[in-house]
Amino acid sequence: MSAPRVDYFYSFRSPYSYLSGPRGFALADEFEIDLRFRGVIPMMMRGESVPTAKRLHTMRDVKREADRLGMPFGRIHDPLGEGATRTLAVSEYAIDVGRVREFVLTASQAIWAETTDPASDEGLRLICENAGLDWAGCSAALNDPAIAARVEANTQELVEIGHWGVPVFVFDGEHFWGQDRISDLALVLNDAGLARN
Amino acid sequence: MREKIEREVAPRLIVAASTVTLPARIAAAARRASGRSGRLELYFGFDDPASAFAVIDLARRLEGRKLIFDLKPVVERGIEGDPALERKRAYAIVDGRRLGRRIGLTLSRSEPIAPSQAAFLAAWVAAAPRGAALTRFCDAACRMIWFESDGALEPAPYEALWHQCFGSAPTGDEAAVRADEKQMTRRGPYETPAAWVAGRWFFAQDRSAQIADWLDELGWRVK
């Protein structure tokens, strides 16, 4: 029997997604689940606006949370646009070659804490190689329409399930929005008897 | 150059500025030296289960600190024209169950409450003096609304509760609620519950550790 599925909707432009990464992927270590990474196009590239007050507060709040979690944050390169699109394309390739966790964690830290520009070949290549991916395969993914369609489908599914932001985890039809709800999801997975011995 | 400023320099400056604490610490020390208390403003809605959790949780966590727990009820708030408003209100019920579980309470409602239904409570609280009686009322009212009842909100049981806490009948002040809403906007929060302490605001349902750290840093420690 296959392990129960947990969908993990994630945006490389969301600093809260970045904060969720280590704990989100660790769920697959702690529980017998099939954790599926679902990279989505950023809100602002989907025509949704973010008020200035929210943008300012997000930066301040994430800094405090990052400090609490012991994660680096602050040397940012906002990947809005090409940077986000290219990173999403490579994340799909990383799924295919079994290195999605390494790529997502490496890319997110590069964007939010190491001022790396994934819109440039130099920046993206550095990220890919640090994540153990071959640059030739990554470059090919950037122009692969099938990969772009997968990202589009992920984004559409997030809209269809009625969610407005990321990260979101979906288990057995139940949604857990935000990096603050990973512990609640863990409780539910535990209650479902999915904890690894 | 503009790209670099927007994508790198500006976010970095915002983050760096957020780590400056000296002015707030000096101001807090001056307040203490003159015998005054610290102040935590909590902007909350009686129609919001996350707010109910924050009122109950913070009332407990702030015990032992020389602080005024300034309860600021609001009715109108949120991001103007937010297309996800109704989805957020429905999700708040799901989320409220999880928050309740954290403090050993079970949500008794399965449907959102319209902000207008709870407006009478906001008007009472906004008009009342801050202090232990008001904290007791808000804590108990939040428990009654979200963890002990279902259906429409009727004033009668809350009037009885008010009598228990204050020994008098409530009087409402809608203008005071509007003033709290304006102050919340000036402070920065766009959603409830939001806690504001000495220049910083926090998502009050999820940042209790940050709030405690900030209070400690300001010197408003548990005695």
Image: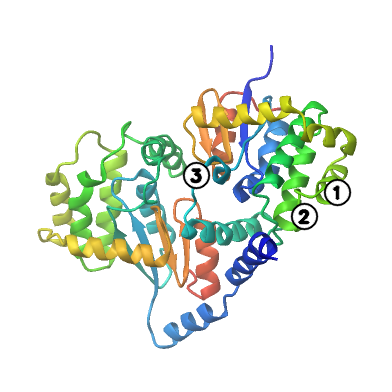
Q: Horizontal and vertical percent for residue A157?
A: 55, 27
Vertical comparison of B37 with B161: above or below: below
Q: Horizontal and vertical percent for residue A6?
A: 62, 27
Coloring basis for residues: rainbow
Q: Mark 3 to mark 2: distance in Å? A: 25 Å
Q: Are marks 1 and 2 on the same chain?
A: yes
Q: Residue at x 44, y 59 (%)?
A: B61
Q: Are marks 3 and 1 on the same chain?
A: yes
Of labels 1 and 2, earlier in sequence is 2
Query: Left of A140 or right of it: where is B137?
Result: left
Q: Is disc 3 placed on a helix, strand or loop?
A: loop
Q: Horizontal and vertical percent for residue A166?
A: 56, 41
Q: Nearer the viewer, residue A157 or A167?
A: A157
Foreground mark, 3 or 2, reads 3
User: Crowding near pointer 1: few (<14 within 10 Å), some, many (20+)?
Assistant: some
Tag shown at residue A48: 3
Amino acid type indicated by mark 1: Leu
Query: Left of B104 or right of it: where is A12?
Result: right
Q: Mark 1 to mark 2: distance in Å? A: 9 Å
Query: Left of B6 or right of it: where is A48?
Result: left
Question: Residue beneath label 1, please?
Answer: A126
Vertical comparison of B47 with B204: above or below: above
Q: Are marks 3 and 2 on the same chain?
A: yes
Where does the N terminus of chain B fall, quadrant-wise? Answer: bottom right
Answer with the quarter of the image where residue B66 lies.
bottom left
Q: Residue at x 44, y 42 (%)?
A: B99
Of labels 3 and 1, earlier in sequence is 3
Q: Residue at x 51, y 63 (%)?
A: B212
Amino acid type indicated by mark 2: Thr
